[in-house]
Amino acid sequence: MTHTDFIAGLPKAELHLHIEGSLEPELMFQLAQRNAVSIPYASVEEVRAAYDFSNLQDFLDIYYAGADVLRTRQDFHDLAMAYFTRAAADGVLHAELMFDPQTHTDRGIAFEEVIEGLLSAMAAAEAQFGMTSQLILSFLRHLSEDAAFATLEAAEPWLDRVTAVGLDSSEVGHPPEKFARVFAAARAMGLKITAHAGEEGPPAYVHEALDLLRVDRIDHGNRALEDEALVARLAAEGMTLTVCPLSNLKLCVVNDLADHPLDRMLALGLRATVNSDDPAYFGGYVADNYRAVAEARGLSRGDLVALARNSFTGSFLPAEAIAANLEKLEAYAAEQA
Ligand code: ADE
Ligand code: ZN
């Protein structure tokens, strides 16, 4: 069996996926037409050509503009179903979806439309593909602490269906510390905590995510490698890092996948996972990320299984569900050996 087939069949969880970042240009055009929204592109090819980024902000400007075609709960349902269909083909048994309510509520779209559309797709994915999923409500860090508190309040009727809160958008200049009180409130409500840290921001932001946000997971975490003591701490705490190789390449966090630190993270004892981040913008879904980094870094099957194992142990599923998924993974690994 080739690496490609082995990866497609490898049972895995996806832990770092922005649902708005799974909006493919074809669906963007369809929704623009359905909602009579004008978009600044003449064709799908023109959209794809615009996806040439030198840093995170370059991408975010285009990503927030693209999200403008999402207007109704049906749109959010269709968006998420398109993702689940791709993920099922990639061997994903469980997906944890980040969504950015503020990107939508700030355009006058009701929180209810966004979340009900996502929840109905999650139920459909479970029925159709047997795939489980959870929601991570993410705050936009370039906006204020007050705005994050207002978002948490708007989410209150649905908090039994939200698993975690996250922190995304422009990292540099918006340290975790800015949101310490919001995350403390979320934790008091029983929500899990994750935050983007060390994608473009310095190791100090990873320290803050640990100490001030008290995260259960770190999204990206690449720049933690610059701080030896921090690496030792992350390893000792068994902290999961949700690493996104193709995203790192497209946003110039690495200059070449051949320089990607994924296997170095594993060798340092870090609980690294592989994820797609914003697959419609970065040129690949989760299996594409496994394949690209496996090829660029010469990963072994053992490495691939270790990454998939980390994706389940780092998930926010209850212990019994983690154990059941790990059993499927180990059976697959043994069968293919
Ligand atoms: N929003 C969507 N993708 C993101 C990323 N990679 N970093 C920060 N914010 C994001
Ligand atoms: Zn991300």
Image (cartoon, rainbow, N blue to C red):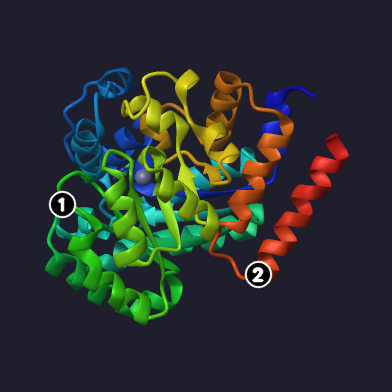
Quarter assignment of residue 106: bottom left
* Mark 1 or 2, nearer chain start: 1
Report the amino acid beneath label 2.
Ala
Residue at 36% x, 31% y: name it: 281
What is the quadrant of the C terminus in the image? top right
Tell me, yes or no, if residue 18 can be seen here: no
Q: Which residue is mark 1?
A: 142
Label 2, ligand 2: CB separation under 8 Å: no
Q: Which residue is the site of mark 2?
A: 319
Q: Report whether the residue tagged 1 is closer than 8 Å to ligand 1.
A: no
Q: Is residue 99 left or right of residue 147?
A: right
**Mark 1, secondary structure of its residue:** loop
Q: In the structure shown, which secondary structural element does the residue marked by tag 2 occupy?
A: helix
Q: Position of residue 169 (x, y in %)?
A: 24, 47
Are the two marked residues, 1 and 2, in contact with CB atoms closer than 8 angstroms?
no
The spot of residue 206 in percent (x, y) is 33, 52
Q: Nearer the viewer, residue 257 or 282?
A: 257
Residue found 57% across the figure and 32% down from its top: 263
**334 left or right of 279?**
right
Identity of the residue drawn at 55% across and 59% down: 315
